[in-house]
Structures are given as C-alpha cells and as structure tokens.
Image: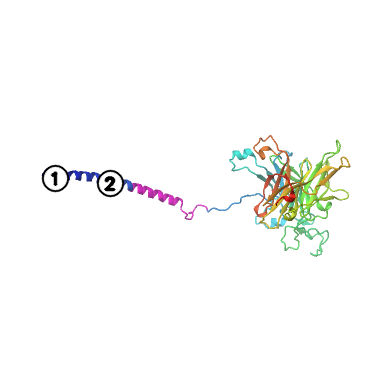
Amino acid sequence: MFALVAAVHAAPAFDAVAELEAAKIEIAKLREEALSFKAVASEREALFSSSPIPEPMVTPSFKSVQPGVFDISGMAYLGGIVGGDGKFLAVHDAKPKEDSDLSSGDPKTRVSMFMLPKKEEKDATEGLEGGLMHLEFTDLAFPDPPGIITGHRSTDLESVARIPGTNLVLLCESGNSADDACNATRADPKHGLPDPTWRYDATASKTDPAFCETPPPRIYVSEVTAGEKPTVTIKQEIYWTEFYPGWVNVEATAVGKWPAPAPGAPDLYVFLWAERESTTIHYTDLVLDANNTVSIGRPGGFDSKSFALPPPMNQTLNRPIVSLDVDDSGGIYAAAAYDTDGDFGPYNSAVYKIGELTFHPEFLGFPMVEIYPEPTMFAEVNGFKVEAVARADKVPVNMYEDGEASAVSGPMTFLGTDDENYGGTLRPINLTLADLEHDEL
C-alpha cells in the first residue's frame, strides 16, 4: 500500500521538473528576443531622430536653381558659321552704374554664347550634366564715347542682329534712360561747365556732378567665331543718331537679305528696328562693303510701316515689340511682353509673325518690306517675359529630338527670356496659325 502511494506521488514530481526546465529555456529565448528588439528600436530612434545635426556636419543651405544663367535681352542664331550650329549669341542689359554698385568689383557680363542640349551628352551622364550650356565673354572692351567715361563697358544692350550669311553681328544698345547730361552736344548749363575738357562719368555715384546714366546709344559691329574657342571681336561702332536721331528706347533690331538682283551684284540688306512701346517697324538700307565695313542709312532717311494688335492682345501686352528677327525665307518675326516694371512678375508674352521681305508686285525685282495689318502666326508664353526671338534653320537633330547628329531640322523658333529676379532661359516654341481675336491670353 505504501509502495502504491509512493508511485502515485513520484510520477507528477518528475514531469514538473521537466516542464520547469522547458519554461526556463522559453523565458530565456523571450528575454533574448526582447533585448534584440529593444536594440533595433534604439537604432531606429537614433537614425530618424529630429535632433539638431551635430558638429562638424554642415547645415544645409539654399543654392541657385540657375547658377550663372543671365537674363537674355537679345539673341541671334549662329548656324552656318563654323561650329555655330546649335549655338546662339546673346546680350545682357547691364549698365556701367550697376557694375560700380557690385561689391565684387567685377563688371557684369554683356555678351555670352548659348549651346543647345545634345542627346548623347544627356544619355552619357544620365541627365545629370550637359543640358543648356553657356559661355561668357568677359574680356570685351567697348570704346568710351567722346567725353564720357564708361569703364569700356556697354550700356543696356537689348538686341543682337546677325547679318545673314556672314559671321558679323550687330550688338545694339537701346538708349533707354538716356539723360540730358550724357547726350548734351554742348556745355551743359545745368552743371555749369566752364571747362570744355569736362568729362562725364557713367560709372560715378549718382550724387557726383559728373554722373550721367546712359550715354548716346551705339551699335557695335562685331565678328564672331564659334569653334572650339569662340570669340567676339568689336570691329566698328555706329551711333543711332547717324540715321535715327529720334531714338527713345529701341529694344528690337534685325537684318534681312534679298538675293543679289543680278549675277555678280552684291546682296541687298535691310536693317529693321522698333521702339519697345510701339507697333511701328522702321527700316533702311544696310550696306556691307568688300572690307566688311557696315554702313546704315540712305538719302531720305528711313521708311516705317505699322501693324495692329487685335484684342485682347492690345490690352494685355504693354510692350508690343521687344524683339525682331528675319529668317532665311524672309519672314519677319517679333516678340511682345507684359511688364509692370517690377522684378517679380507675373509676366506674359507672345511671339508672332508680322511680315516678310518680298518684291514689289508692280516693279519687277524691286525689294520691299511687307508688314501685315495684323500678326498671322502666334504663340502665347504665359508666366515669362520674352525679350528675344530667333529663327533657326538646320538645327542638328540631336539638339531637339532623338535623332542623329548628321540630320538637321527645318526652320524653328527659339525665345530668350529676361525674367528679372527669376533669371532667364532659352527654349524652342511652336507657332500656329490662329484667329487672334478669339485667343484667350
């Protein structure tokens, strides 16, 4: 009997010990997992902590979206020049006084060259580099006008006009903000100048009696190369007063060409220009002699023709002509803009075709400039202030679509913008035939 009782109590005692050992092992595993989870959680907390960045790590800072890209005030396509396909010469509207205000002491760039993006460069760098490229010409020395110190810098370059079929371009000042002091033709009674050797200074402080902001505007005839080492060389200067004494603010210029009227005869060129706040195109002869010397004007002065902007464009674009260009087929194109003179926008612009170079229907072979009553082709550019339009033919296909570099485009239209505090850019656009009276701007 006692043996039976002992057997009954002995069996449960053996099972309890085994279970206890098993429980201890399980508890140890759970403790180990808990410690591991805690360690991972601690690492994640440290990784995603919002605590300040410890020294010596650098605090993040803002960088310019478009470093070095300047406002574009005018541009011309360089196709046909050696190395010029896909490149544009551009000007920027700096003034000598603005240079004097810079803390760096370095003058602002006046002229630069842009090169369109290339497909193979973008592919090779996975899109990280390449893109729209530009080159600054920082060593250009513009001659000082007689009696005026400019620091050998241009004043308000607003347009570029290439002479078709050549590597010559006209870099054109606008004359904007011209004052009496800079443009006086005799001793200025306002400053009481007893000394005829007095020199005005466009780089001086505005409180200086000798200060004048804008000298008489000039056109700089320049030679361009666009190969591996592009250059711009000023060859000649022409004063606007030589053929257009009534200038106010000329922001648009272009040169067109008619074919030679007879074998062996020179080509015929025409110089076109317009005031910024007008819809009138002025034009006169441009002559290029055997030495590549340029003369502008003719006996009798110049001719003028106007067009009309239909509504609502005539209410929404307060600068009807800010740029001009003439393409290889003789088409005349213009750009217009809306600007309140503020540097923050918003802006609005349009590009349109306004006329063509043709021949007189009654006098066979007599060249003429035809300006349409209203623009015929149109593109709206909302949010940007366009200041340059350039027609380009034979652009390499790898610069505007996924084609081979050996193929070329037909005529294309490019624009350049001067968006003030938002910088500038260059882009291709499409022009379409449109009923402008029903377009919403």
Residue closest to the eye, 330 or 265: 330
Residue 76 seen: no
Q: What amino acid is at disc 1?
A: Val
* Spot occupied by residue 193 in the image (x, y as percentages of width and height): 81, 63
In the rendered structure, the answer to whether residue 181 lies left or right of residue 113 reads right
User: Which residue carries the number 1 mark?
Assistant: 5
What residue is at 42 percent from the left and 49 percent from the top?
43
* Spot occupied by residue 288 in the image (x, y as percentages of width and height): 82, 43
* Spot occupied by residue 48 in the image (x, y as percentages of width and height): 46, 51
Q: Quadrant of the N terminus?
A: top left
Residue 120 seen: yes
Residue 23 got which mark? 2
Mark 1 is surrounded, within 10 Å at the Cα level, by few (under 14), some (14 to 19) or many (20 or more) other residues, namely few
Q: Is residue 259 above or below residue 178?
A: above
Disc 1 to disc 2, C-alpha distance? 28 Å
Q: What amino acid is at disc 2?
A: Ala
Earlier-in-chain disc, 1 versus 2: 1
Contact between labelled residues 2 and 1, with CB atoms less than 8 Å apart: no
Q: Secondary structure at mark 1?
A: helix
**Magenta stretch: residue 34 in it?**
yes
Q: Which marked residue is nearer to the observer: mark 1 or mark 2?
A: 1
**Magenta stretch: residue 137 in it?**
no
What residue is at 25 percent from the left and 45 percent from the top?
19
